[in-house]
Image (cartoon, rainbow, N blue to C red):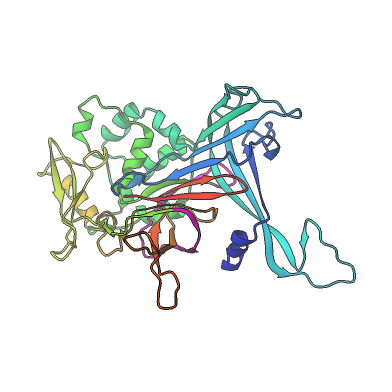
């Protein structure tokens, strides 16, 4: 999308049109005729903790209020379990001029001097968890839905993981674990995106995708595990975030690395309803990675870490079920030293990357093309100790641009869309 088109959608938006579409074609689309005004909320996140935690795989949540009308009636629990995709169409002038004709009148398709066009955004894909009648109004229902990660966390994978992964001792990380789970739950995935990370080579010339999972400690206890936890732990092990990206189908599993050098920055937000910023840059780098090793833990210090590396803290991965050293006397141990001496170690430690950014919460104008994992630039007015604006020599308010990654985002409203952005970690 061009910057000019974005500007038109921000400053000259004519209207939004929201619809809830069902994968079951026999269920009619729910349109705004049956949607309560401004009642939509979509929560998305890959990190909602105070410290930077890799893995992601946090289920997105969609809520909205649905109303019965004479033309269409609803009843409680009507759509529970149904797969939906939520679409918003934004209409705005294109900037393309309408050339004069002998007869030309304004219409819903033609705005004086400019053509009108639509932009389609799929903002949520997932399954309806509940459809509850309001206790005060029998014609009002609250629809709540989550993406497929919610299902994955509810499905017990203990027996499958034990019999087919730990006992077999030869299952490969990519095909036999990750792709198996995604296929089992009919989750589409971006293969090019996934292969970019799983085809990384280690220093012994092996591939990340061919790694095995060894965990003698977990094998011999009674702990339970879900399919969602397995996927999240794989993502964390690689220093990445798993996310379900919405589309015009069922959604798509992707891996995100917000801190790579190719990060996209959404240009300037100059207006906001609310802005809270910790003006001190926080260091999100780590010197070492701590993992489990039989009945104790072990700290891996990647070979690229130098004495000049700023932060002496370590990243704790001891709760990760797929990261475990078997024994210091076997060659199996070398796999995590190899892994964390490579790109995965650089992603987790932040070595050679810019991971200095402010903790920020802000309510901004809604921009549907800004995605989880993007960076945004917010203009902040500078104030003195009394809360008064500091002016420059020309009498203008002094400002500073804050550039932060979008790690959590809540979209609210329909016609008056807002983005509540959080950058924790």
In the image as oriented, which residue stretches furthest toward the right?
Answer: 102
The residue under the point 54% across, 56% down is 369
Q: Is residue 399 above or below residue 422?
A: below
In the image as oriented, which residue stretches furthest toward the bottom?
Answer: 393
* Closest to the observer, 364 or 228: 364
* Closest to the observer, 273 or 81: 273
Residue 137 in which image quadrant? top right
Give the total of numbered labels. Answer: 0
The residue under the point 38% across, 59% down is 404
Q: Is residue 131 left or right of residue 422?
A: right
Q: Does 264 lie within the magenta span?
A: yes
Residue 357 in which image quadrant? bottom left
Q: Picture coordinates of residue 38 (x, y %)?
A: 60, 42
Q: Is residue 202 left or right of residue 95?
A: left
Q: Picture coordinates of residue 53 (x, y %)?
A: 30, 47
- For the question of whether residue 172 can be seen, the reply is no
Q: Picture coordinates of residue 111 (x, y %)?
A: 76, 62
Quadrant for the N terminus in the image: bottom right
Q: Picture coordinates of residue 399 (x, y %)?
A: 41, 68
Q: Is residue 354 above or below residue 395?
A: above
Q: Does 235 lie within the magenta span?
A: no
In the image as oriented, which residue stretches furthest toward the left?
Answer: 329
* Closest to the observer, 166 or 185: 185
The residue under the point 34% across, 51% down is 240
Task: Give the magenta range.
Answer: 247-274
- For the question of whether residue 162 can be seen, the reply is yes
Q: Is residue 409 above or below residue 158?
A: below
């Amino acid at each position: 999308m061009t910057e000019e088109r974005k500007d038109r959608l921000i400053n000259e938006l004519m209207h939004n049109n929201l619809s809830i579409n069902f994968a079951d074609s026999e269920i009619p689309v729910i349109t705004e005729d049956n949607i309560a005004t401004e009642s939509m909320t979509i929560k998305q996140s890959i990190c909602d903790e105070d410290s930077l935690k890799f893995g992601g795989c946090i289920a997105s949540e969609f809520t909205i209020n649905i109303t019965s009308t004479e033309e269409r009636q609803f009843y409680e629990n009507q759509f529970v379990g149904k797969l939906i995709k939520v679409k918003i169409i934004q209409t705005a002038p294109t900037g393309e001029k309408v050339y004069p004709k002998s007869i030309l009148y304004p219409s819903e398709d033609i705005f004086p001097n400019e053509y009108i066009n639509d932009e389609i955004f799929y903002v949520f894909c997932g399954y309806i968890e509940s459809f509850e009648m309001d206790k005060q109004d029998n014609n009002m229902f609250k629809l709540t839905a989550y993406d497929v990660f919610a299902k994955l966390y509810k499905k017990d994978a203990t027996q499958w993981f034990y019999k087919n992964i730990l006992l077999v001792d030869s299952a490969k990380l990519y095909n036999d674990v990750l792709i198996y789970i995604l296929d089992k739950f009919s989750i589409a995935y971006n293969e090019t995106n996934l292969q970019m990370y799983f085809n990384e080579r280690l220093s012994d010339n092996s591939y990340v995708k061919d790694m095995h999972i060894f965990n003698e400690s977990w094998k011999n206890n009674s702990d339970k595990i879900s399919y969602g936890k397995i996927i999240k732990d794989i993502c964390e092990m690689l220093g990445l975030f798993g996310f379900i990206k919405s589309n015009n189908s069922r959604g798509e599993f992707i891996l995100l690395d917000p801190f790579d050098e190719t990060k996209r920055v959404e240009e300037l937000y100059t207006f906001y309803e609310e802005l809270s910023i910790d003006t001190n840059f926080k260091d999100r780098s780590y010197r070492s990675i701590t993992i489990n090793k039989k009945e104790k833990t072990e700290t891996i210090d990647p070979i690229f870490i130098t004495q000049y590396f700023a932060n002496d803290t370590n990243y704790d991965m001891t709760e990760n079920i797929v990261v475990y050293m078997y024994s210091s006397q076997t060659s199996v141990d070398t796999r995590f030293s190899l892994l964390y001496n490579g790109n995965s170690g650089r992603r987790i430690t932040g070595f050679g990357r810019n991971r200095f950014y402010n903790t920020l919460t802000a309510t901004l104008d809604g921009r549907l093309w800004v995605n989880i994992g993007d960076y945004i630039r917010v203009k902040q007015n500078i104030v003195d100790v009394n809360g008064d604006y500091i002016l420059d020599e020309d009498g203008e308010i002094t400002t500073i641009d804050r550039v932060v990654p979008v790690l959590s985002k809540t979209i609210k409203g329909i016609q008056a869309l807002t983005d509540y952005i959080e950058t924790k970690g």
